[in-house]
Structures are given as C-alpha cells and as structure tokens.
Image (spheres, grey):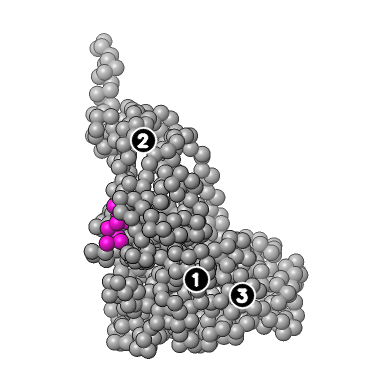
Amino acid sequence: MSAQPSVSTWKHLLIATAAFCGGIVSLQASSHVAVEVKHLFHDQALVLDSIQYENKAGEPFSITRLSYFISGVALKRADGSWLEVPGSLAWIDAGRGRTGMDLGALPDGDYTGIRLHIGLDPVNNSSDPASRAPDHALNPNVNGLHWSWQGGYIFVALEGRFGRKDKAAPGYAYHLARDPFLTSVVIEQKFAIKGPTQFALNFNVAKVFDGGSSISFSRDGASTHSKDGDPIAVMLKANLSDAFTLGNITSPVSAAKPAPRTALTTPPLQLSVGLNFPEPALPEDNPLSKERVALGRRLFNEPALSRDHSLSCASCHLSGAALSDPRQFSIGVDGRSGNRNGMPLFNLAWKREFFWDGRATSLRAQALVPIEDHREMDEKLDHVVQKLGSTEGYGAAFQAAFGDAEITTERIGLAIENFLLTLTSYDSKFDKAQRGEVELSADEKHGFELFMMEREPRLGTMGGDCFHCHGGPLFTDHQFRNNGLAISETDLGRFNVTKISIDKGAFATPSLRNVALTAPYMHDGRFSTLEEVLDHYSEGVQRTETLDPNLAKHPVGGLHLTAEDKKALIAFLRTLTDDRFVGQSGPAKK
C-alpha cells in the first residue's frame, strides 16, 4: 500500500488544481468590510440648508447640496504594498442620507493606510450610462450627476448660498468634473481587519473651502464646471485631497434583504425606451403584463371612478396634450377646482415621487388619490370596488390580470400603475437627429448649444444653463427646486411634505419632452406660452431664501437672455415633441 500524501502535499495539490481551473484558492481568512461617511464641518456634524458657516474671507455661506463619487479604494499592507479593492465605487449624497459604501470581503490582517479617489477613473467616466442597472451607482437616474450629451459625470456637486443671511443671498454651484480633476486621497493610519468591519470615513467639508487654498465666492467666482485652466477647479481638487480622515472602526449593521419578485402567470411585457435612456427601476412586486396594462388602460378611461360618473383619469390628462391638462386647473365633480395644473403622464417609470410636491412615493398610490379627493373625483374607494364588481367584464379582466376575479383597491392601483409605466416618450425630432435620421435647423442647433452651455461670464460662456435641471435624455433630474417664483404661503410645495425649510416654494422639475404640447406652465399654470417661461428665467426670477443655487448664482432677475437666444431656445424645445403624443391617437387610447 502506498503512503498517504502529507498535509503540505495536499495544500500544493489544492493550489495546483485551483490554478488549473482558472483561479487561486486563498487560505487566508477574510471578512466583510463597509465604509460609512461622516460629513463634518470642522469637528461638528454638517448641517445642510442653513447659512451658518463662514470661510476665511469672512463670507457666511450654506451648503444645500453635497453629492459625489468615491472609487478606486485600496488598502496599504504592512509591507507597503497596496491591496486594490476590485469594483469599489459608491455614490454619496449628504442630503439624501446616502453615506454607505460596501467593499465586500477583504483579507483579515494589519494595514497601515487607505487610498481612494473622489470621482471616477477615465473608463467609468466615459462609459455608457444607459448600460447601468437601475440601482447601480452610475445610473444617471439614481445619482443625477451625469453630464448628458456633454459626456462624463460630475465628480463632486457642491452648492449653496453665500454672503448674506437673508432671502437676497446669491448662490454658488461648484461642479468638479473631467478626468484631470480625479482626486486622490491617501490616509496613513494603522488599523486591522479581524471579523466584520465598518470604517467611519470623516469628510471635513470646511477644508474644501479653506484647505491649502482658500476659496472666496466673491473674489474667485460663484460657479465652476471644471473647464481647462479654471483656478476654482484646481483649488477644489487640492483641498479635497486633504479633507478626509479615518474615524471609528465598528461592526457593520446587516442590510435588509430586498422584497421578492411577484411571479406572473404570463410572459412579462417589455418596456419600450429610448436608445440612451437609463434603465428604470420598475416595481418588482408589480411586473408588467399585457393583461394588467389592458386593465389599467380601461380603468384610466373609466368614469365610474368618479362619484357621479362624469369624470375619468383621461378627462384631465388628454391624449392630445401629452396626457396633461390644457386648463390652468383641472375641474372636478360639481365644478370644483384645485390649485395646481395637471401634470403630463409619460416617462413615469423613472420617477420616484409623484405630484408637484412628491407626496406619493409610488404610481399605485398616486393613481388612487384623485379618486377620493373632494376637488377631483370625490368618490370612496370601496364604492368604486362595488361599482366595478357590478360592471360587465371587470371580473374577467381582473381574473386575467391577477389570477382570480377579486376586485380590490390595491389591485386597482396596481393595474393603473402598470398601464402608466408603459407610457414612454422617446421619438421626437431631437431623438431622430441624434440617430442621424433628420437634421436640426440652424436655430434648433443653436438652441441646443445654449441649452447645454453654462453661464460663466468670467470664462466667457453665456449659455442658458438649462441642463442643470433638465439635462439627460429624460430632460429632467426629478428633483424639487425653487425656480424663482414668488413663494406663496397658500402653497409651499415640497415643504408641505418634508417640513424642511429649504423646500419652501420647491416643486417637481417637469420633463421638457413634449413641452410645446403641455401649456400652461409651472405648478400653478401661470404661464400660457414658452415665451413667457423664458421671460421668467431671463428677467423675472425672484430672489427668495430658498431659491435654487443654480439660479441664485446668476445676476438679479435671471439670465438676461437676448431676443435671439430666446428664439433659438424655443426652436430647440419644439424639437422635443413626440408625434405619438399629438392629437386624438395618443397612447392613452391606443
């Protein structure tokens, strides 16, 4: 009988076998590692939206937005070599409470430092944003930091107000971007990984303004988009590199498991989207199906949803007006009126909050609100269930959509949600020009250039600055902003939902797709034409204490566009009309 191999021989055989199969088996223990970013101003927790800080130039200022990428994490071993963490990338946003970063399983042991980048490497920065999964950090619908047709991402967005502690305070918007401004951070500090570990990464935001280079808003400028040779961008990069330290090391908290996907009895329906559109995060518990879409379309056009059978959803969302309401305010049962204009209903699959103030966090919830609103359909949901149950055909339709004939409030919402998710707009003249099928006119091209151009007089750029809020293929960032209308105490917008002071007078940023079809404009329908809208942004912006920094950085009144600029911008905006949303053959009826 032959002798048994030694333990040492078994190890060599194991390693050789693993290598043959395409990898090496590590015999070193590893542990799960996570990072939690702590945003500080000096040694105190950062407070957003309050003009309580002061830079070395003596200028009081606030921070209303701090959003950025961390990537390229590496740990320094005791021998001085670096352990790269593959795929380490996170989008961090102080205002949204998005402060965590998962590094996965890393080898246990002693380390002497950590290295990371603020921003993205050239490969990720130039990658196709439409290829990213719905929940990926680089999906532009998640982070709101992609520079759309200009290409690349904003590495750091730092915005706020400065100089005065009143409603007239001007704004600043510092956007650090482009490959030369990828910032390396190296922290020399001993630590150990032995079991599940969470690092606190302290970000002292004060050093961004007053690090090795002191930045003055009034002296250096109130905005940057990182053009070549821009001294503000150079100072921001230098200051960022020294703004981080390691804090406490603790055991991480386990994350909740995602909800399981609901199975369908029929093949799922595929959503039609534009070529450059980011992938939407469709609801996993309500997958698209032709049966649910058909039921939702029927319910959308069903007058029994209203108390007196006089109104359906389609009554206030007209197919010929891109599913918006051409009246200033929609008229409900008994002639009652609300105080907001009916929003268009397309490309809703990419939205996270609904209504002008975002009070509904799902389409299914949004769909049910008008039914019970006294100013709209003025009906009770249990009455709707009873009426549908006695209407021929609905039992079979619910059976086909949900597997049995039961009619419930929840299923009504799910069916309408399914239908609304399919209303996508992506085939305008502008889209056709992007595909090389048609050519824009000289005015339309000039309008697009103005739309995408910053207004930075110190660098000689005098654009329309539209893309900050309306950039990307969806032509909206889905945020809530005070866009320079006088604040009305009778409708404070987003503040009614959040009770956060900075949200006073903030309303949802609408998509500019089909904007030529969706008059009147603004949340209260105060402007009847696109010309009036541009006049507002050119000369009519009201400085209030919550005015968005991207508008507050401009001169008093607004952009002060020329008549030629306004003409070109309107010409471009008209190229965003999707012919499928014009006339009575719109998608709500097809």
Residue at 42 percent of width and 38 percent of height: 247
Q: In which quadrant of the rendered view does residue 402 lie? A: bottom right
329 with respect to 479 (left or right): right
Which residue has dot 3 on it? 488
- Distance from Cα at disc 2 to Cα at disc 1: 51 Å
- Distance from Cα at disc 2 to Cα at disc 3: 54 Å
Which residue has dot 2 on it? 106
Residue at 41 percent of width and 28 percent of height: 194
Place of residue 120 in the rendered image (x, y in percent of width and height, measured from the top left): 31, 54
Decide which of tag 1 and tag 3 comes sooner along the chain: 1
Q: Residues within 10 Å of mark 1 (few under 14, many from 20)?
A: some
- Which numbered marker is on residue 168? 1
Circles 2 and 1, Cβ within 8 Å, touching? The answer is no
Number of numbered labels in the structure image: 3
Residue 417: tell me if it is visible.
Answer: no
Give the magenta range.
231-238
Place of residue 372 in the rendered image (x, y in percent of width and height, measured from the top left): 71, 71
Assign a secondary structure to mark 2: strand
Amino acid at the residue labelled 3:
Ser
Amino acid at the residue labelled 1:
Ala
366 with respect to 533 (left or right): right
Residue at 61 percent of width and 70 percent of height: 492
